[in-house]
Amino acid sequence: MTVSDEFDPPFDVIEPAHWRGPVVFNSPHSGSVYPRNFLTSARLDHATLRRSEDSFVDELIAGVVARGYPMMRAHFPRCYVDVNREPYELDPRMFDGRLPSFANTRSMRVAGGLGTVARVVGDAQEIYDQRISVDDALRRIESLYKPYHRTLRKLVSRVQAEFGTALLIDCHSMPSVTGAAREVVLGGIWPGARTAPGIVR
């Protein structure tokens, strides 16, 4: 059994019966299917691991499909592999073995324990009590991260070909902050990609 077989499927795209405009909705962090081997190797219990999820965001936005817009969602959890990272943002302190020379080991997200394969969840709680193999991390990237991004790119390209432009809306949840308004940042999920100035308010 491969990594992706445990998810069956690892992600899906829900298309509308009638497409109304150039908008794609994406929920990359609401996945809640945890591989058995991952749960066994983690030092944290299932409930604690789930604190890293953007729980139920996919359900919150599901209504967009009936309104004419496609939605993509991950079923695997972000603490297993995070598709909102560069493909190889990896912390060398986590792994047994040599990382590829092209791995980004110095990003702020890696430093915070939140690389492509996360080191921590919640309030900086370590996921593992020992190093994991580099091969394990690379398998997650090859079998989940890369197919997810290939599918998302195809979906965005399809919308762009149909409407002449495309807007990708990544949907997340944030911890509540009493008495304070949160700033909403519109950016790009691919290296070098940015939101068009006319969309930002």
Image (tube, grey):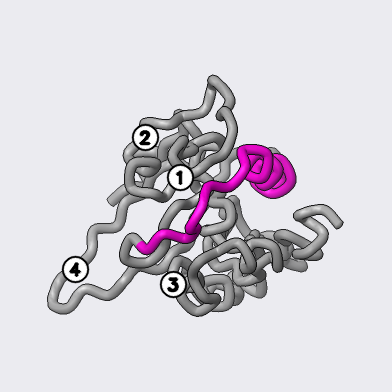
- Could you tell me which secondary element the residue under label 4 belongs to? loop
Near-viewer residue (47 or 129): 129
Q: Residues within 10 Å of mark 1 (few under 14, many from 20)?
A: many
Q: Amino acid at mark 4?
A: Ala
> Does residue 122 lie above or below 2 as drawn?
below
- Residue under the image location 37 percent in, 66 percent down: 122
**In-front residue for pair 125/151:** 125
Question: Which is more N-terminal, label 1 or label 3?
Answer: 3
Question: Which residue in the protein does label 2 denote?
Answer: 107
Please provide the residue range marked out in magenta: 125-152
Q: CA distance from mark 2 to mark 4?
A: 27 Å
Magenta segment's dominant SS is helix
In this figure, which residue is indicated by the disc labeled 1? Answer: 115
Residue identified by numbered label 3: 51
Other residues around mark 4 within 10 Å, as few (<14) / some (14–19) / many (≥20): few
Q: Name the amino acid type tagged 2.
A: Ser
Q: Residue at x 57, y 40 (%)?
A: 165
Q: Pick whichever of labels 1 and 4 is earlier in the sequence.
A: 1
Q: Position of residue 15 (x, y in %)?
A: 73, 63
Task: Using the rendered image of the protein, determine whether residue 156 is visible from the camera's viewpoint.
Answer: no
Label 2: element kind: loop
Among the two numbered marks 2 and 3 on one chain, the one whose residue lies closer to the N terminus: 3
Q: Which residue is mark 4?
A: 181
Label 2 neighbourhood size at 10 Å, few (<14), some (14-19), many (20+)?
A: some
Residue drawn where x is 49% and y is 70% of the image:
44
Of tags 3 and 4, the one toward the viewer is: 3
